[in-house]
Image (cartoon, rainbow, N blue to C red):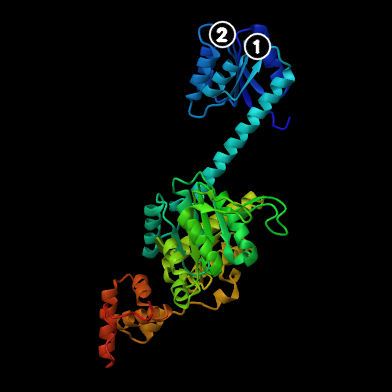
């Protein structure tokens, strides 16, 4: 018997000798057992206590086993039910199963037979409970409330994900490496009606070009030299769910044409097959490459681009949303601390010292959110206590110690207008001239930013800054 015998079983049997025998044998096998002689009483017990399994007779006075099954199945978390009776027939078995019974045993039976059925029923129930718990954990992890969005740009992303989750439209997620494109793809999946289906992800840049077609669409035995058995492709594995095609910009042109056909026809044909297979899959693609440039040079198909880019989500880099850095760091530290406890490490609730916080805010984060996670993992590994100091951070972060900007401004006897101008110019420089991102970071609308830049240009005696109607070379 593989199942751990810590489960609770209710026995409902009107024959006293049989009831006592079942209770004794089940208790000897390690189960916690409660017994009663009537179905009505058994239903009261089931409503009052939480049982993992109910073993019930069929023929009983006043209320039979069928009525008991109906009552039990109406409970919020019904236990499995095994019916035993001397009046076995195919019709009775079918009826019991249709009502919700797990299995059916006819008298006379060997006690080992009953123990085996009980063990299987409890094993399946334990598995279902574990799967449901894991699914809840996954849904909690990828719930929209877990996406750190203090900045307006990320609040806009979360709002868009919430609006499109119920759709079946394809989504293209763009952004620099490490900005969290897969996190957004999973959030779309787990907040949609496909949440009970599979989420299948593949990094197309990590799969050799000669194997991508087989990986995506599958193959039949003998389709090529190493095809020793049939294989389902990832589209079939994702049927009823979502497929995440990461690094879509790395897909070669011939495979782009085949992917386009799958998206148009909702069918795949494995290598070596003669028939298509219908699939119901939502596609979320992602890339850190500039697909507009690839369209212009012919390395990415325009028809595939528009098929994927039904809904576009552009993730901002971490440097453009500094208000998210410390909340993200605190969230990650909570996750890393919980992981450490799960790995039997000493319980520590890690926090950042003020000087470490200032360094994180001053750093430019070229590796984005992924780099922040790596920096925090390093800090935990080096930290002697529960407070990560500046000395626990890597050299590239420590080198970006913030200067005393306000102290320097006071020493230079700068006016408030001078301070505002220098701050705006520094933010614009940090954003490589991108006025849209600079305006978002400053909390200004673009018209206000252009007006201020125009004033600065006039006061310096140079040509005016572009107006909002002018093209923004950095956007």
Residue at x 50% of width, y 54% of height: 186
Look at the numbered disc 1 and give the secondary structure of its residue.
helix
Q: Is residue 247 above or below residue 236?
A: below
Residue at x 46% of width, y 61% of height: 327
Q: Is residue 377 above or below residue 391?
A: above
Circle nearer the N terminus (2, 1): 1
Residues under numbered marks 2 and 1 in contact, where contact means CB atoms less than 8 Å apart: no
Give how far across and how far down residue 10 sits, in percent.
60, 19
Residue 200 visible, this orientation: yes
Q: Which mark is residue 19?
A: 1
Displayed quadrant of residue 32: top right
Mark 1 Cα shell of 10 Å, populated few (<14), some (14-19), many (≥20)? some
Q: Quadrant of the N terminus?
A: top right
Q: Which mark is residue 156?
A: none
Residue at x 40% of width, y 60% of height: 310
**Is residue 162 left or right of 74 when viewed as pictured?**
left
Give how far across and how far down residue 72 sits, in percent.
51, 22
Question: Where is mark 2, residue-wise?
Answer: 60
Displayed quadrant of residue 441: bottom left
Between the C-alphas of marks 2 and 1, the distance is 13 Å
In front: 235, or 195? 235
Mark 2 Cα shell of 10 Å, populated few (<14), some (14-19), many (≥20)? some
Q: Is residue 460 above or below residue 149?
A: below
Look at the numbered disc 2 and give the secondary structure of its residue.
loop
């Amino acid at each position: 018997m593989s199942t751990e015998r810590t489960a609770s079983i209710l026995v409902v049997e009107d024959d006293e000798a049989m009831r006592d025998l079942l209770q004794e044998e089940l208790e000897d096998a390690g189960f916690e057992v409660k017994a009663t002689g009537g179905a009505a009483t058994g239903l009261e017990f089931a409503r009052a206590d939480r049982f993992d399994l109910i073993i019930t007779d069929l023929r009983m006075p006043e209320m039979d086993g069928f009525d008991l099954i109906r009552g039990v199945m109406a409970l919020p978390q019904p236990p499995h039910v095994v019916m035993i009776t001397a009046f076995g027939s195919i019709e009775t078995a079918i009826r019991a199963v249709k009502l919700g019974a797990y299995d059916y045993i006819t008298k006379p039976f060997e006690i080992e037979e009953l123990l085996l059925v009980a063990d299987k029923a409890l094993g399946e129930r334990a598995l279902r409970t574990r799967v449901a718990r894991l699914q809840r954990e996954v849904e909690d992890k990828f719930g929209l409330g877990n996406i750190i969005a203090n900045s307006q740009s990320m609040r806009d992303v979360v709002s868009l994900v919430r609006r499109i989750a119920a759709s079946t439209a394809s989504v293209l997620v763009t952004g620099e490496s490490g900005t969290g494109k897969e996190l957004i793809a999973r959030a779309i999946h787990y907040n949609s009606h496909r949440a009970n289906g599979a989420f299948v992800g593949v990094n197309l840049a990590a799969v050799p070009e000669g194997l991508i077609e087989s990986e995506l669409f599958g193959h039949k035995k003998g389709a090529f030299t190493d095809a020793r058995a049939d294989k389902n492709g990832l589209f079939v594995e994702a049927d009823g769910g979502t497929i995440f095609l990461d690094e879509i910009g790395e897909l070669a042109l011939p495979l782009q044409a085949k992917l386009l056909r799958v998206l148009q026809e909702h069918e795949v044909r494995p290598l070596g097959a003669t028939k298509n297979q219908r699939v119901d899959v939502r596609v979320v693609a992602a890339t850190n490459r500039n697909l507009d440039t690839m369209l212009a040079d012919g390395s990415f198909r325009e028809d595939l681009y528009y098929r994927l880019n039904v809904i576009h989500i552009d993730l901002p880099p971490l440097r453009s949303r500094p208000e998210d850095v410390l909340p993200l760091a605190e969230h990650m530290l909570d996750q890393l601390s919980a992981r450490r406890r799960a790995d039997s490490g000493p319980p520590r609730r890690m926090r950042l010292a003020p000087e470490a916080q200032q360094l994180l805010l001053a750093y430019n984060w070229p590796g984005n959110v992924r780099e922040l996670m790596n920096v925090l993992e390093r800090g935990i590994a080096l930290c002697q206590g529960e407070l990560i100091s500046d000395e626990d951070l890597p050299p590239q972060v420590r080198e970006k110690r913030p200067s005393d900007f306000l102290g320097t401004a006071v020493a230079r006897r700068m006016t408030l207008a001078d301070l505002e101008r220098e701050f705006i110019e520094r933010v614009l420089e940090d954003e490589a001239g991108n006025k849209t991102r600079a305006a978002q970071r400053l909390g200004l609308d673009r018209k206000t930013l252009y007006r201020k830049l125009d004033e600065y240009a006039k006061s310096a005696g140079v040509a005016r800054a572009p107006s909002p109607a002018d093209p923004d070379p950095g956007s």
